[in-house]
Amino acid sequence: MQDDRFPAIEPYDSGMLDVGDGHQVYWECCGNAAGRPALYLHGGPGSGFSPGQRRFFDPDAYRVVLFDQRGSGRSRPLASAPDADLSANTTAHLIADIEALRQFHGVERWTILGMSWGTTLGLAYAQAHPGRIDALVLSLVTTTSRREVKWITRDVGRIFPREWNRFASAVPDKLQHLPLADAYATLLFDPNPTVRDLAAREWCAWEDAHVSLTPGHLPNPRHEDPEFRLRFARLVTHYWRHAAFLGEDQLLRDAATLNSIPGVLIHGRYDVSSPLDTAWQLSQRWSTSELHVLDDAGHGGSGTFITAVVGALNRFVAA
């Protein structure tokens, strides 16, 4: 597989930022300290960022800030903690954290790269603070609407009936009346650790199933880590059951607030986890965006996916 990312680099600065509510978020800076400011927003919610994601940015041109969103990665406290409280973990809190990071690093405006859930967060932040955005590169586009959550937890089971049956059947009878995200969110906080771990395993198995149309797909090895799968599943179900704490179709409805901000939307034709219509509708409402549909990609990486992301970032820094 072709990989057009830049060589691996290490951060030149890192730290923890106290953002209130008992939370500290881990951040790091890499690239050129005098370069064009940029921010990376990871997926999940709850996945944290990985060193490989530094490589999307030209280290000679960009000054990149990466951070682990509340409850994930090296931020503290983790959503997997026995006494985890997610009440101060909402989209509004994450938007405030981004603003705190921007001010802490003395950034006036920055270019944002978001992937999957990171596109939802990137759109929400940009619509709240359009004056702080130079450009947006959004790949694997989602808005985490109730319609999208229903699709990814139930309707896409028409494509994966055996896997969905296992996913739905893992919910006990007493919770079968609930939407699946709500039922799993309840199980993931069950007092019994065996119940919690089984729910986390089944949730992550379903995650692997519905992204499996990506060419060359392999199960996510991080799902074998009990701590990772519990925090990941807790945060995903928390945000999904609340439709990202946003009004229904809010991000599409308010897309015109981004007009004049250049954007590139990158989406795979085989992405059944987040069907293409969301990215297409967004592109129709956001007049200064362009949509790139990749005919060999699903909800994950491919050679053309990496090339498209790197190419978009290179174009913006050249401009």
Image (cartoon, grey):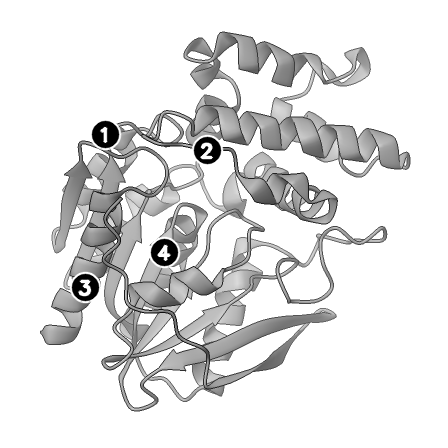
Q: CA distance from mark 4 to mark 1?
A: 18 Å
The circle drawn on residue 269 is 1
Front residue of 164/277: it is: 164
Where residue 245 sits in the image (x, y, percent)?
54, 46
The circle drawn on residue 218 is 2
Where residue 109 sits in the image (x, y, percent)?
30, 78
Residues at discs 1 and 2 in contact (Cβ within 8 Å)? no
Where residue 96 sits in the image (x, y, percent)?
52, 69
The quarter of the picture where residue 177 lies is top right
Badge 4 marks a residue whose secondary structure is strand
In the image, is residue 313 above or below residue 307? below
Q: Amino acid at mark 4?
A: Gly
Where residue 44 sits in the image (x, y, percent)?
52, 47
The residue under the point 30% across, 43% down is: 253
Q: CA distance from mark 1 to mark 3?
A: 25 Å
In the image, is residue 167 above or below residue 103? above
Local crowd at mark 4 within 10 Å, few (<14), some, or many (≥20)? many
Query: Which comes sooner in the sequence, label 1 or label 3?
Result: 3
